[in-house]
Each structure stands twice: as structure tokens, then as C-alpha cells.
Amino acid sequence: PTSAECSAKVLAAPLSAMGCFGSKLTASEVQGANGRIVKGSRVQTVNTVAEGGDGSWYQGTVQDCFADGEVKILYDDGDKWTGSAQEVYLFDAPAGDPGGRGRACQQEVQLPHGQVIQATVVG
């Protein structure tokens, strides 16, 4: 190779490592809305009405964390999303998380006449 080709290869490697050329720098963890998020964390986000959504919460698994504070999520329904970790709640948040946001629980309630309703409470 010519010296120009060698110089290009030397310069391209650090730029690629810095997140240039379409790649992003990964991070071991990022700060989410209610705790530290790592690759593999079970999380949930809300599809807000203000942004054209239906107000529903969707659960998924973090595929990657990025140095810019974003996360890549693969939702349980197969959808994918990459965005700010500040909008992402740990699904099984630690006991000490502020306000208990992001913690989900299930409770079975016995109603009169033998009817049973199962609900998942979020928030």
C-alpha cells in the first residue's frame, strides 16, 4: 500500500472507535429514570399521548448502552427503539428507588360473586 493508504487506515481506526462512521461508543451502564441501566436490564417505557402514543407501557430488554446516555431496547413484541435512558424505567427497580417508579407488581383480588381480576400496577 502507498503511504497515503496507510495514513488513511491509521486515521480511520481511531475515528471509528470514537463513534464516527455510523457507530456509537458503548458504555457499561447509563443512568435511567429510576436507576442504573446495563445491557440485559429488563425495562419499560411509556408510549406517551403527547408524542402521538396511546399512553401504554411497553416492556423490553436493553440490547446496548451508549456513552451519549442512550439505550437500545428490544421490546417483548419485537419492536426496537434507541433513545434517551432518562425515558427508560427499570422494570424491577431496586427497593430504594425514588417514589417506587418503574416497579411493577401483580396482585390478585377476589371480588364479590366469585369474579377475579388480575392487574399490573405501574408507577
Image (cartoon, grey):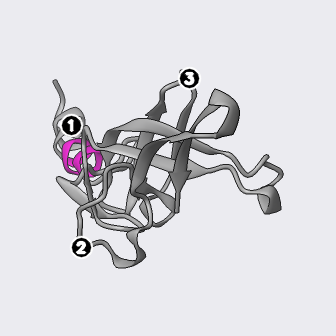
Location of residue 99 (image quadrant):
bottom left
> Along the line of sight, which residue is nearer the eye, 17 or 1?
17
Position of residue 9 in the picture relative to residue 120 (left or right): left
* Circle 3 residues within 10 Å: few <14, some 14–19, many ≥20: few
Identity of the residue drawn at 16% across and 43% down: 10
Mark number, residue 77: 3
Q: Which mark is residue 96?
A: 2
Left or right placement of residue 122 versus residue 47 in this view: left
Discs 2/3, front? 2
* Residue 54 sits above or below residue 35 on the image: above
Distance between the alpha carbons at the discs numbered 2 and 1: 49 Å
Q: Can you give x and y, in whole percent of width and height, for residue 15 in the image?
A: 28, 51
Q: Which residue bears the numbered disc 1?
A: 9
Residue range of the region highlighted in magenta in the rendering: 11-17
| Kind of residue at disc 2 | Gly
Query: Which is in the foreground here, disc 2 or disc 1?
Result: 2
Q: Secondary structure at mark 1?
A: helix
Q: Counting other residues with Cα less than 10 Å from the Cα at mark 2, is it few (<14), some (14-19), or many (20 or more)? A: few
Q: Is residue 12 magenta-colored?
A: yes
Amino acid beneath label 3? Asp
Please report whichever mark, 2 or 3, sits nearer to the chain's N-terminal start: 3
> Do labels 1 and 3 touch, CB within 8 Å?
no
Residue 84 position, x and y percent, is 49, 60
